Amino acid sequence: MSQKGTQKGVVLTVSRYGRGSAKRNRCAHCSASLKGKRPGARYCSPRCRQAAYRARHAPPKGEQITVSSCAHCGGGFWRNNPAQRYCSGSCRTMASRARREATIAAVSGWMGVSQTKAADVVEIQGLAKVSNVLSAAGFIYDDTCRAWMMPAGVLTPSQILR
């Protein structure tokens, strides 16, 4: 005993044991026919699938999306979160690597040690701690140049570590 009923483009088949299977015959977004599509299809085209995704993930009314520029590549992107600085995860990773390399170069030049020893210091102490020490000494990290700038009057390592 099975019964068939329609509910907004879905053919419901209810078996005698209460389990049912749903077979769509209409697109979930535009209600176009799915005739000739694969059996589990929900949308008639990639365009409808993308439009349905955007409709489901649209920001709530009243929330503004701002256009910002990426701190690493300078490209424009839309952001919902005011703390977001990068356009993608790969830009965030590349910026972190560039900051690490710039920190190693700054520590090497400032302390007068080799790049290898400076890299060991950054690895052992951590990038955040070494960056804080450089900032306390008067260095300023410039995102556009991807380097630590050393203004006049920078404290020496012995003055900082006292």
Image (tube, rainbow, N blue to C red):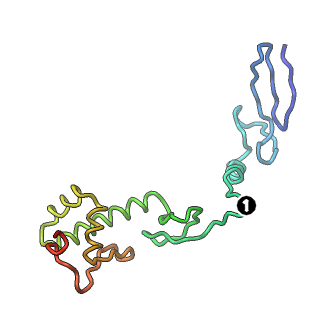
Residue at 56 percent across and 62 percent down: it is 81
Q: Nearer the viewer, residue 17 or 151?
A: 151
From the viewer's perspective, tell me whether residue 151 is left or right of residue 94: left
In the figure, 38 relative to 101: above or below?
above
Res 103 quadrant in image: bottom left
Neighbour tally class for label 1: few under 14, some 14-19, many 20 plus, Cα within 10 Å: few
Q: Nearer the viewer, residue 153 or 65?
A: 153
Count of numbered marks = 1
Say what secondary structure mark 1 lies in: loop
Percent x, y for residue 84?
A: 51, 63
Q: Quadrant of the N terminus?
A: top right
Percent x, y for residue 20?
A: 76, 22
Residue at 80 percent across and 35 percent down: it is 25
Residue at 79 percent across and 37 percent down: it is 35
Percent x, y for residue 121?
A: 19, 60
Res 60 quadrant in image: bottom right
Percent x, y for residue 93?
A: 39, 59
Q: Residue furthest front?
A: 162
Residue at 80 percent across and 13 percent down: it is 16
List the residue tagged with mark 1. Answer: 61
Q: Quadrant of the C terminus?
A: bottom left
Q: Nearer the viewer, residue 68 or 37?
A: 68
Res 127 quadrant in image: bottom left
From the viewer's perspective, tell me whether residue 69 is left or right of residue 95: right
Q: Amino acid at mark 1?
A: Lys
Q: Nearer the viewer, residue 54 or 34?
A: 54
